[in-house]
Image: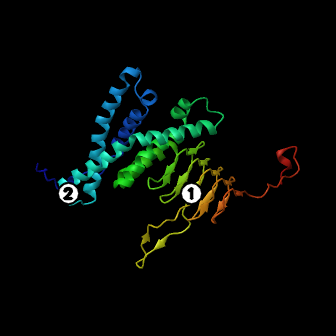
Amino acid sequence: MVMPQIPEDEYPFPSRLALGQIIDNLASALFPMRLGPRGLTLETEDAFVVTSLRRALPDLAAQVRMELHAGHAESEADIHAEAHRIICALAESLPDVRRLLDTDLEAAFAGDPAARSVDEVLLCYPALTTMIHYRIAHLLYREGAPLVARIITEIAHSRTGIDIHPGAQVDESFFIDHGTGVVIGQTAIIGKRVRLFQAVTLGARSFTTDEQGHLVNTPRHPVIEDDVVIYAGATILGRITIGAGSAIGGNVWLTKSVGPRSIVQQGAPNVSIERDTLEDWP
């Protein structure tokens, strides 16, 4: 079939609004009894999932085609074939996405005594909203749709205050407690059973440039090994490694690697004599 040729400047860019709706539909397909419509039953669950995917996946393919057009792909047929490949890869990976999200849910429930059920975690915790967006976006990023992927994680950033680049690699059982202000850079690698608190930054310390002074996209963010806990406000910069089983204290500024089972913390706070009134303060 001959694809219609459309002038290049008439192609729109991917839509943030449309992608937000698509991710909501995919989330409801992944967790139909919790994020699906009111009145859904076990008898109608499968039909709802099929309907949701039949709506969301073609809509997502259209957004990917817009990105490929913006990237000046060679022909309309090539664009449709590549978008189809990307969406098929995502669709085939959705069961694995659900499995990873289940481990994130279980980690959150096990790690927070305030959580009364995994349902509460899924419905209320910003970290799980973020991880649904991130785990879908990471697949799209890996398969060749980085702009669509980045828009999806920025939607999560707007909704939750958690900023995870879709290029970051995050293994199973990942939990961000509270979450607001967390930043995870593009080349960060995070192992299994890692737990972060609010305002943690996994960032870059410096940037490599080429001979013309242009930035080069090299590995520049931390590697966090398995079973690490990083407390609120910690800033970890550069391509350094935090060894397995380590704990990084609140507000620590860290630019050097630490070995397994390390404890990194600031000095003890200076406690002065108790004052009776505010007027007694210097």
Q: Residues within 10 Å of mark 1 (few under 14, many from 20)?
A: many
Observer-nearest of 40 and 213: 40
Residue 213 in the image: x percent, y percent?
Answer: 43, 76
At 40% from the left and 39% from the top, the residue drawn is: 95
Residue highlighted by disc 2: 8
Image coloring type: rainbow
At 86% from the left and 49% from the top, the residue drawn is: 280
User: Residue 201, located in which quarter of the rendered image?
Assistant: bottom right
Q: Residues within 10 Å of mark 2 (few under 14, many from 20)?
A: few
- What's the distance in space between the residues labelled 1 and 2, CA to CA? 38 Å
Amino acid type of the residue tagged 1 in the rendering: Leu
| Relative height, residue 143 to residue 221 (above, below) | above
At 50% from the left and 57% from the top, the residue drawn is: 185
Residue 160 in the image: x percent, y percent?
Answer: 51, 43
SS at mark 1 in the image: strand
Q: Position of 111 compared to 83: left or right? A: right
Question: Quick one: label 1 or label 2, which is nearer the N terminus?
Answer: 2
Is the Cβ of the residue at disc 1 closer than 8 Å to that at disc 2?
no
| Relative height, residue 185 to residue 87 (above, below) | below
Observer-nearest of 43 and 252: 43
Could one spot residue 141 in this view of the protein?
Answer: yes
Q: Position of 180 compared to 12: left or right? A: right
Could one spot residue 126 in this view of the protein?
Answer: no
Residue 169 in the image: x percent, y percent?
Answer: 48, 54
Q: Which quadrant is home to the C terminus?
A: bottom right
Please, which residue is most extreme toward the left here? Answer: 2
